[in-house]
Amino acid sequence: MISNSNALSFSGSEAVKYLKANLFGYFKEAGLNPYITEEWKKGLFKLFNIQVLNLPDLNEKNYILLSNHISDFDGLILGLLHPNIKIIAKIGWAANTELMDFLGLHYNIVGIYRGFEIAEPSHKEHNIKINAECYKHLKDTGEAHHLLIFPQGTISDINKNSRERINPSFARIAIATRANVINIFSEYPGADGNNTRIIGGSPYNITDRSLDYSKIWLDDIIRIQNQLENIREPVLGEKHSRNNNPDEPFF
């Protein structure tokens, strides 16, 4: 069994090494092929004992899924809840060719430059292009399509986040696409034999541009979290443990 006594957060190069040194070995021992999506999902959900609570049928309509971000496994777990989930990730992950050679088999991941990372016009143009792709994805009227966003923008503890660290741009997407929104609390993933719980709030619409959606989202995620007992304590690395106050560096 894989231990996660260390923080489950990686740079792109570290993630590749972790996959090869740990996860691939685990899948081999379990008799599962990590290159087949259904077996990848089965193994990952078994490893962390994933328990999904209070989520609607994701085949019914398009949703924007707004989750807290507590480890680099959040997107890998949540991105397997439905075959048509587009994941918005930071550019450092999405642009890592070696990493995406594997993740691209199982996930639809697009990378964006966060505000402080935009250093030239091409970065802004890239983000505009990605936004257009996301709008099109959510407006698809065929099979259900979903968009997974992490409003914190990076790994951090929601119980320590200030409102100013939450990016409310999801509200603009929701208004433009008229897609329903689901707030999701993801428990820190554990390979300790206990369940790792994913719990959703009730779907809602966003129509009023004037509201403070940073505060609304943060308050609701904490409310959803507090419905659970004996929540696993997150293990954050030194840099991510500082992603809380407005005047602190953003990683």
Image (spheres, helix red, strand yellow):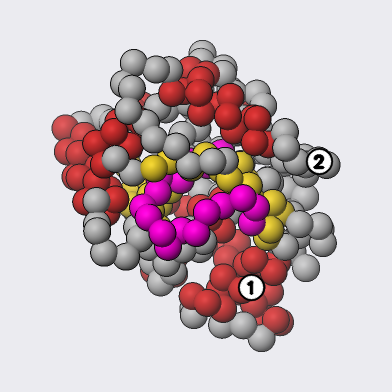
Task: Name the foreground residue: 162 vs 238.
Answer: 162
Label number found at residue 229:
2
- Does residue 119 appear in this view? yes
Tell whether 16 sits left or right of 116: right
Please rate how many residues cluster around mark 2, counting C-alpha atoms within 10 Å: few if below 14, some from 14 to 19, many from 20: few
Q: Residue furthest top?
A: 247
**What amino acid does circle 1 point to?**
Gly
Going by the numbered disc 2, the residue's amino acid type is: Glu
Camera-side residue of 143 and 12: 143
Q: Residue at x 68, y 58 (%)?
A: 51
Name which of mark 2 and mark 1 comes first in the sequence.
1
- The stretch of residues the image draws in magenta is 52-68
User: Depth check: 202 or 159 in front?
Assistant: 202
Q: Residue at position x 39%, y 42% from top? A: 180
As drawn, 179 above or below 73: above
Find residue 96 and report its image quarter. Answer: bottom left
Residue 189 spot, x, y in % from top left: 69, 52
Which residue is rendered at x = 49% and y = 75% of the image? 37
Q: Categorize mark 1 by other alpha carbons within 10 Å: few (<14), some (14-19), many (20+).
A: many
Pinpoint residue 56: horizontal percent, then vertical percent.
52, 54
- State yes or no: residue 66 in magenta: yes
Q: CA distance from mark 2 to mark 1?
A: 26 Å
Mark on residue 43? 1
